[in-house]
Image (cartoon, rainbow, N blue to C red):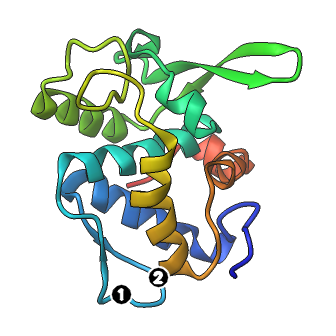
């Protein structure tokens, strides 16, 4: 059994983020210990999973918080998003800067999937919130195997809470 990482280790972050950017744009990436094995199948679902990872880190969010984000919370001109974070004592709204390229890739994905009218930022093919079990099965488990440590949606939030990433935004 592999151990759970509280956050993506600093020495792997550039590789990890580059892999997620690549997958968000192409639907596949080659990462981790065995770079010859691809993660993703070039599908629009694989791209949504990578976008979910990038938005989770960018907003310092769990999976539920990310997939619950409404498209109306995104300010395309200011490159910001208002996220609802759920903590003890109830939800609280936080505003974060969002990398303009992440916005462009997300908008392109929404158009290609026909979900550009959805109220959710990253809906599934039925227009509703994607399920955690499929995200875990199709994205987090393969990433965990590739990197040699367990990655959870809490790992993504903790990685985003690291000050250098939050201050700089995500880089392509």
Q: Residue furthest right?
A: 89
Residue that appears at 50% across and 60% down? 140
Residue 94 placement: quadrant: top right
- For residue 36, above or below residue 16: below
Task: Give the class, few, some or many, for how many residues have Cα within 10 Å of label 2's Cα (few <14, many ≥20).
Answer: some
Q: Secondary structure at mark 1?
A: loop
Task: Give the class, few, some or many, for how many residues have Cα within 10 Å of label 1's Cα (few <14, many ≥20).
Answer: few
The N terminus, quarter of image: bottom right
Q: Which residue is mark 1?
A: 35
Q: Which residue is mark 2?
A: 32
Front position in the image: 50 or 45: 45
Residue 86 placement: quadrant: top right
Could you tell me residue 83's position as x and y percent?
A: 59, 21
Mark 1 vs mark 2, CA separation in Å? 6 Å
Marks 1 & 2, CB-CB < 8 Å contact: yes
Front position in the image: 24 or 78: 24
Check residue 27 in the rendering and tell me which mark sits there, or answer none: none
Front position in the image: 140 or 97: 140
């Amino acid at each position: 059994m592999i151990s759970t990482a509280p956050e993506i280790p600093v020495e792997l972050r550039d590789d990890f983020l580059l892999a997620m950017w690549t997958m968000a744009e192409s639907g596949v990436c080659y990462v981790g210990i065995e770079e010859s094995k691809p993660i993703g199948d070039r599908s629009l679902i694989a791209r949504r999973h990578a976008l979910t990872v990038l938005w989770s880190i960018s907003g310092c969010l769990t999976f539920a918080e990310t997939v619950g984000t409404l498209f109306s919370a995104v300010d395309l001109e200011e490159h910001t998003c208002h996220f609802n974070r759920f903590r003890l004592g109830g939800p609280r709204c936080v505003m974060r800067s969002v990398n303009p390229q992440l916005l462009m890739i997300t908008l392109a994905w929404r158009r290609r999937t026909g979900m550009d009218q959805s109220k959710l930022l990253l809906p599934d093919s039925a227009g509703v919130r994607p399920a955690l079990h499929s995200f875990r099965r199709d994205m987090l488990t393969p990433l965990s195997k590739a990197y040699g440590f367990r990655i959870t949606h809490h790992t993504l939030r903790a990685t985003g809470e690291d000050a250098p990433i939050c201050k700089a935004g995500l880089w392509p």
